[in-house]
Image: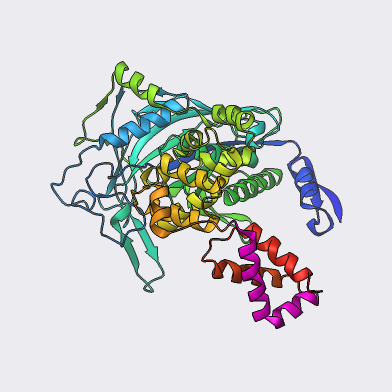
Amino acid sequence: MVDTGDRGGVTVPTVDVSELSLVLYRVLTTTGFKATIGLELHVQLLAAQKLFSAASAKWNEPPNTNVNVADAGFPGALPQLNPECVQLAARAILALNGQIQQRSAFDRKHYFYADQPLGYQITQQHHPIGRGGYVDLGLLDGLEYVKRIGIHQLQLEQDTAKSIHGVYPGHVLVDLNRAGVALIEIVSKPDVETADEAVFYVRKMQSLLRHIGVSSCNMEEGSLRCDVNVSVYRDGEDRLSGTRCELKNLNSLKVIRGAVNAEISRQIDVVRRGDNIEQETRGYDAQSNTTFVTRTKEAVPDYRYMPEPDVPEIHINDSWIARLRKMLPETPEVVMARMMPQYGLAQEDIETMLGEPGCTAFFEQAVVGRDPKRVLSWITSEVFGQLAYRSQRLADSSITVPQFTQIIDALSSDAITSAQAKQLLIAFMDGEQRTVDELIAAHRWEVISDDGKLRVISKQLLDAHPKEVARYLKGQTRRLNFFVGKLMQATNGQAKPQNASEIMKELLEARR
């Protein structure tokens, strides 16, 4: 049912959503309004140690094992700036087309909470290490038009500890492993206008920061966290005239899209009723697709910013910036535009490689004189599979380009089977130093290319399993896989799977 009513001098459609599609509902309820959106990304740096201490920054370690006196806030423990974090932050600024500030400084942001052992956070509110820059979105990012999202500033800061709820009723546990881990906070300008733009912006940031080796940007691990500021305004009004609300701790792209759309719809409904938007911090309930108040403007603490007295200012000269700029790899856009026609790869394939720092360089060294599709397949399936199993990054693994290409070449020449190639890959990633030829000789591997020998073994297997043969002949054609597996087992994996399948099928069909 659809009727109209007069609310605050505005004629408003009242819609029964059960009778209309969600798309039509949104069109009816958002006509005449636009949104202004700004994002704050909290990105954990790929530094081995924390921002102000020598404690390990490794993720997913046993609770309270990567802590020292500075992280725990012991009296008299002084912070010492980790230069690796400064370099990673500077790389991010340059990759985002921003300006590294030759003088930057730290501030204390005071607030008391259980996960903040110092009683304050060391950040760069007033003199950040980077200002300006932008990210361009377009067709390759999923947007049907070109949009530039400006960057306001990029600042270094330390992370808080992690509060763990629900283990002991009435108690909150604190894990200090994360306390003091290095973050960069990337604050966008309020240039975003839709939930899709917000999602594509975050996704592009993920790809870029991974590609240049600044962060893993895994939202499920918490190495990328997102806060979004949303306001709405009527067509023709100043786009900054609305009252903004902040959506905190959005931990996936799906959640970002849902939360932004829900908050835009909520604010439009409030304005249409003639009420005022209250400035507040809100959370998002994905199950009900609604946002809810977590803190009102009156409850916002006075952070009492003051200059950090224990950490000196950072001073950077032009020659250091020039050297760092020369070390930056191509941007993902440049890599995409070059590699797609050069190697005949799909956009999705290159995006997958861009998600692993150093992977495109590994691919381009390995692909010389080889089939790009085969090289890509082995990298994204077998190598990535081993990296995931070992919780490793490609740059930290033992596999080298020469070792990888030896496997591909041996496989292409039928010197080894696919199963043997996978065993070689595992050996190399375990640190094996012998060559492929030496390992083949040591294991006495050889591919059985004599079809006559395979036929003899296959006939013996068919004779040994008459019931399975009968099932195949009755139409259970999947029993072919049973016999192929038996043949591979009987030959210790030395038969080529394709040959094994063809011979078995021929012999089975001959028994009809």
Kindly give the residue lying farthest to the bottom in the view shown: 467
Give percent across and percent down for residue 180: 29, 47
**Quadrant in the picture for the N terminus:** bottom right
Range drawn in magenta: 449-475
Give percent across and percent down for residue 34: 68, 35
> Is the residue 120 above or below the residue 427 in the image?
above
Can residue 339 be seen?
yes
Kindly give the residue lying farthest to the top in the view shown: 318
Relative placement, left or right, of 114 versus 185 is: left
Q: Quadrant of residue 312?
A: top left
Task: Give yes or no for residue 385 being in the magenta stretch.
Answer: no
Relative placement, left or right, of 54 versus 277 is: left
Relative placement, left or right, of 364 versus 431 is: right
> Is the residue 228 above or below the residue 449 in the image?
above
**Quadrant in the picture for the C terminus:** bottom right
Give percent across and percent down for residue 196: 64, 41
Question: Is 388 or 386 nearer to us in this picture?
Answer: 386
Task: Give yes or no for residue 465 being in the magenta stretch.
Answer: yes
Can residue 240 be seen?
no
Question: Is 338 or 434 nearer to us in this picture?
Answer: 434
Give percent across and percent down for residue 442: 38, 57
* Dominant secondary structure of the residues highlighted in magenta in the image: helix
Circle count? 0
> Is the residue 269 above or below the residue 479 in the image?
above
